[in-house]
Image (tube, rainbow, N blue to C red):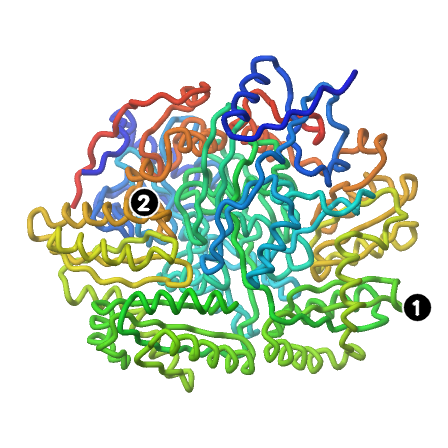
Amino acid sequence: MAKTPTLRPGNTADLIALIDAARGAGTRLDLRGGGSKAGCGAPVDPAATAVDMRGFAGIVDYDPAELVLTVRPGTLLTEVEALLAEHGQMLAFEPFDHGPIHGRAAGDATIGGVIAAGVAGSRRLSRGGARDHLLGFRAVSGRGEAFVAGARVTKNVTGYDLPKLACGSWGRLFALTELDIKTLPRGETALTLALDGLTAPQAVAVMSRAAGSQAGVAAAAHHPETHHPAGGVTALRIEGFAPSVAARCALLERLLADCGAVRVMEPAEAAALWDDLRTLGSLRNMPVLWRVVVPAAHVCRVTAALAPTPARWVMDWAGGLLWVGCTAEGLPPATLRALAAAAGGHADLVRADEALRRACPMRAALPPALAALEARVRRAFDPAGLFETGRFGDD
Amino acid sequence: MLAMPPVDQAVIARRDAIAQALRAIVPDGVIDRPDALRVYESDGLTAYRQPPLLVVLPETTAQVSQILRWCHDQGVKVVPRGSGTSLSGGALPLADAVLLGMARFNRILDIDYHDRIVVTQPGVTNLALTRAVEDRGFYYAPDPSSQIACSIGGNVAENSGGVHCLKYGLTTNNVLGVELVLIDGTVLRLGGRTLEPAGMDLLGVIVGSEGLLGVVTEVTVAILPQPETARAMLIGFPAVEAAGAAVAAIIAAGIIPAGMEMMDKAATHAAEAFVNAGYPLDAEALLIVELDGPQAECDHLIAAVTQITQGHGCTTCRISENEADRLMFWAGRKAAFPAVGRLSPDYYCMDGTIPRRALPHVLTRMAQLSAHYGLGLANVFHAGDGNLHPLIMYDANVPGQLEQAEAFGADILRLCVEVGGVLTGEHGVGVEKRDLMPVMFSAIDLAHQQRIKCAFDPDLLLNPGKVFPVLHRCAELGRVHVHQGQTAFPDLPRF
């Protein structure tokens, strides 16, 4: 079947008309931003109409002293980050562009896509995820109705916290048309401390001790093989005002003295390491990529079980996030999902060929009662299933 | 008069049978003596009182599940209650509803220092969580002023804040998972010990849902290492505008203090008279700025804040030299509510949030309203995040003053929304701000929220009469377009 042409609404009235028309015709709508995550999930139903949301672009309001940015979702992530950087601020959840993970050029990711997919990077450990930074939004639901939720202030408990639900909804509840996002000051300085040659259990112990200390570790990651023949590199990122960073680093050096030599990473090495945790460049030869979220205390159950397999991995969030790369034959999805579940977590399929993406849902199955509740919540916003395109396998 | 859902007389007529059925589930946990029920007749919003039909005090998740399933099957309404400290009437009983008290869920279940997590039952108090982990150098960050009494379950229901939430977040940013019982008795786990849940973030909607979606029977929270040092600064300004500009400049300089509080002259005088904290009585606005972290960081930030506030014309600036000083600086602020209570027979505490840049305008308008209503006003203000707590002074024994105070409060909240803010920053909507929801949200906005309610509780049995100004039946909400003009609530007498 030929794919229907893409629609590109430019305002809320057009979007409502488009949704009303789709509801009347029984057409499904595939809401898209820059397409950087188009490789996630099962292939979209070819009969679905693609809706390019990049017509909703531009900064609506930004007052750095209020710590709030109002932006339309089609705005490029790079544009948002550049604007905030000009004012010494940042998106503290450290979102990133999934394009390179899927073999595409960087630069296409939109802020709406980042929010809808709930993308958070290494600083998730200390500063929360996308869900902790979306304060409010405007959207059009599957009922063809424009509505608002949350607000443009950082402290608000008026009504249900629908912004939490928007993050990680992958466009299955409503089409976002405007976002109110919390911004925070960017640390004046950042330093990365490293320990070399630790095994995974040693690294997890070091990261736990560091994250539980008064050093205020912004991010903690472990790369098992790239940098050291005997083991990996364990990296602790410290951010803030220069005197604070110096004091925190000194504290960590004392705290970890019995764990091995603590060195300050050269800026280029540190930049490459943290960049690798966004692009997963070190796993680029692995056709299948999994994102495994587990309690850090149990992550080594997963890594130990992976040791005899051809799978490779890198660890972020002090062990709370494990990116696992493998070949299609090397590690059956059911095996990895069972490992993640046994460790108290779950595994999302991020990259795979079309055949595997058809066969294996992006997300692990939820317990039946929870899946039923989630379906009722989806239907509350989208009664006709207009935004269900087969991509997530549980329509 | 505050309207509440129509009382179902048939349910009241079945009171004894309902008590018997609940006793079969919790033999030692049903209260039905009228004098004993009076204990539960109000929460922290004491202007409203209504003894419940019955009180049931379960102690296991299985009992909660059985109680809710039974009530669901029988069409009996349920009002969940934690410690009863809500300032918005979130736990106000209904004459025809079972009050489900969670006080017996009082155990901490697990402390995991490796992943910095505590798993607790919901009846444990906020402060008890910190007490349980402080000897190992940890604490639970959200610190509502009722923390000695309020429960974690109530914190989850209300998404409670506190003076430190500017830097450390509200409850929602510190909760990782809950066990939840739906009205039909289904037991679910949302989130858990991981940094992200599987599936959609339903946990994010549960936090702050004010007991309308389910009953939380277990909570997993994140704990943080206590900062190495904390120091406070007490800074007086000759004008509110200068204090507001200094706050904006501190944040624009990249500094997020652990706490940043402002008090106006009336609140400063009341607090000083109460606790003798050494507050400057000539200041029109007083800032308390707390900085925490390593000693070197505190020193650096204190120097930076000193320079900024001097640049904005502060008239006094004191820096705590020791823990006793720091606690004394805070003592006045923490006692501000009872201090105002000494000046006036009654006070009514409001809770709007505004964009901070609107502060001078809002303070001017509030002063005009104060003159208009002839009621005194003192302001304490979480300056960092724009959360206002105006305290309206009145005398409930003077006929009409309570109504005047409520009208004044409603005008303040309308003003907050008018300048781009919200009705409630941390106290919740409850019954108190329920009828003001249309000031902030359209009927369509509210319908989108209430359909969430329908997804969890289609018969609207959990905590009815709270949050939503109009009770739409779920079948009616299922239609595509929202219609105006609904059955009104009958009136509830007020005390």
* Chain of the residue on which disc 2 is drawn: B
Nearer-the-camera pick, A40 or A359: A40
Q: Which mark is residue A229?
A: 1
Circle 2 crowding by C-alpha within 10 Å: few under 14, some 14–19, many from 20: some
- Which chain contains the residue that carries disc 1? A
Q: Residue furthest top?
A: A25
Taking B274 as reference, is B31 left or right? right
Residue placed most toward the observer, A377 or B361: B361
Residue A15 screen position, x and y as percent = 55, 26
- Residue A225 location in percent, x, y? 88, 62
Decide which of B335, A250 is in the foreground and name it: A250
Residue type pointed to by label 2: Glu
**Do the residues under discs 1 and 2 have CB atoms within 8 angstroms?**
no
Q: Quadrant of residue B7?
A: top left
Quadrant of the frame with the N terminus of chain B: top left
Q: Nearer the viewer, mark 1 or mark 2?
A: 2
In the rendering, at what x and y percent does residue A301 appear? 79, 55
Name, please, the residue furthest toward the bottom: B321
Q: Is residue A233 left or right of residue A209?
A: right
Q: CA distance from mark 1 to mark 2?
A: 63 Å
Q: Would you call the spot at circle 1 few (<14 residues within 10 Å), some (14-19), or many (20 or more)?
A: few
Amino acid carrying label 1: it is Pro
Secondary structure under the numbered disc 2 in the rendered image: helix
Q: Which residue is mark 2?
A: B418
Residue A213 position within the rendered picture, expressed as x and y whole percent measured from the top left: 62, 73
Q: Is residue A174 above or below residue B197?
A: above
